[in-house]
Amino acid sequence: MENFTAYNPTILHFGKNVIDKLPAHLDKVGKNVLLLTGQGSVKKYGYFYQVVEKLQQTGKNIIEFSGIKPNPIVDDAEKAVKLAQQHQVDFIVALGGGSVIDTAKMVNMAYANNQPVWDIMKRQVNPVKKVALFVILTLAATGTEMNGAAVLQNHQTQEKIGYFSQLMYPDVSFLDPEFTFTVPKNQTVNGIIDLIAHSLEAFFSGGNAPLSDRFVASNILETFDYAPALLNDLTNYDLRARMMWTATVAENGTTMHARTTAGDWGTHALAHHISLLWDTPHGQTLSVMFPAWMKAMSYKIAPQLKYLGTLLTGKSNIKPEETIQIFEDFFVNIGAPVKFEQLGLSNQDKQKLLNLWHKNKPTGLNVTLNENDYQNIISFL
Ligand code: NZQ
Ligand code: ZN
């Protein structure tokens, strides 16, 4: 096992009506709150009004910024920073999925430190302060509710990149599975893919971390178990709760201790380019990219693929390609795309993707990628 430091400062309330606990956290955070939301679902389904009621109960002055799009962009974050400055907000509440929460994290950094969002993300400046961030999650997928990461797109520089800071862990997150009942089936599928992908990114890190490996396998097996039932019963509380918790656990550190790298993330880095070019939902880019990456990188990761297959099946003589097949079959069974053309994209688009990879040089932290690997991955898409 490697040396490691365990750190996760987020207080997480999980279960029915946890939003009732919000007022008790608000007595020391000032009066002006920036409330960030997406493109309307929280109003349509009423979550917005529940949160507003709690904020008003405690005498807060709400400054609203709405309209954050899926695959969020740096321009929206900058607009929200201006609004925060104009009203001198004291704290931030993010109500939504990963896109809203990630934007809120970067707005927090830029506002509290008076630094441009993109300069922070490119690590040209170093934020040292934050204001309090409260998160009310409406979509299980990214794990951003209990980690210090955020991902934004910048169309000027043609990048979709992540940024991590210990300052960005939410102070308190509220996870009520009932807030996810309205997530449509296709978006639920996207969330399932994302949490499986996060479990795999952790698994393909470096180092010897047996317990973390078993957490990964358990999280994946748990997901294989509830996913088909959930997709036929989207308002089943227990199934939604199981999904919500597996999504958090996939990305809150549980699967990471004792590893040499902070995940692999090569597949994510490659897949982000599809979202950047065609605004494809994050989950769909991963069910296409992960099988292709595993096939193309099999020459480097065959032992890990066999070990993962053994953890998942209990059998000792699993071949690498059988492990890959387990994931491909699962994605197909839940109705996820596994081929590039199922995203509505063509062979010419593959070339565009390859060109952008050559320009930005995405790679993994453990399994490094070269120009030949790009070509091979493209051939498996
Ligand atoms: O915009 P609204 O109207 O809110 O609708 C959203 C959006 O259209 C909708 N939705 C959310 N909650 C709902 C709902 N619809 C009905 N009922 C509800 N309760 O779902 C759509 C997708 O929302 P989004 O926030 O974009 O999804 P997700 O949570 O999957 O976030 C994806 C973003 O997170 C990044 C991704 O790259 C992508 O930009 N990631 C963030 C990570 C992190 N911070 O740790 C890690 C991930 O790997 C990922 O990269
Ligand atoms: Zn992801």
Image: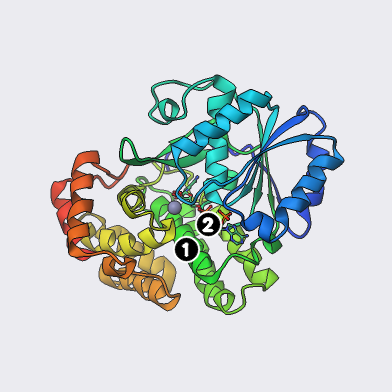
Return the disc, 1 or 2, that comes first in the chain's sequence: 2
Secondary structure of residue under mark 2: loop
Q: Cβ–Cβ below 8 Å for labels 1 and 2?
A: yes
Vertical order, 253 against 109 (above or below): below
Residue 190 numbered mark, or none? 1
Q: Residue at x 57, y 78 (%)?
A: 229
Q: Residue at x 27, y 43 (%)?
A: 362
Image quarter where the N terminus lies is top left
Vertical order, 237 against 198 (above or below): below
Instruction: Pinpoint residue 75: horizontal percent, then vertical percent.
Output: 46, 36
Q: Disc 1, ligand 1: is the CB inside 8 Å? A: yes
Q: Quadrant of residue 225?
A: bottom right
Which amino acid, by three-letter code, is at mark 2? Ala
Q: Residue at x 27, y 47 (%)?
A: 367
Instruction: Mark 1: give few (<14), some (14-19) or many (20+) Cα within 10 Å.
Output: many
Instruction: Pinpoint residue 289: horizontal percent, then vertical percent.
Output: 31, 60
- Give whichever of 316, 342 is nearer the camera: 342
Instruction: Mark 2: give few (<14), some (14-19) or many (20+) Cα within 10 Å.
Output: many
Left or right: where 165 falls relative to 260: right
Residue 141 numbered mark, or none? 2
Left or right: where 15 falls relative to 353: right
Q: Quadrant of residue 359?
A: top left
Q: Disc 2, ligand 1: is the CB inside 8 Å? A: yes
Which amino acid, by three-letter code, is at mark 1? Asn
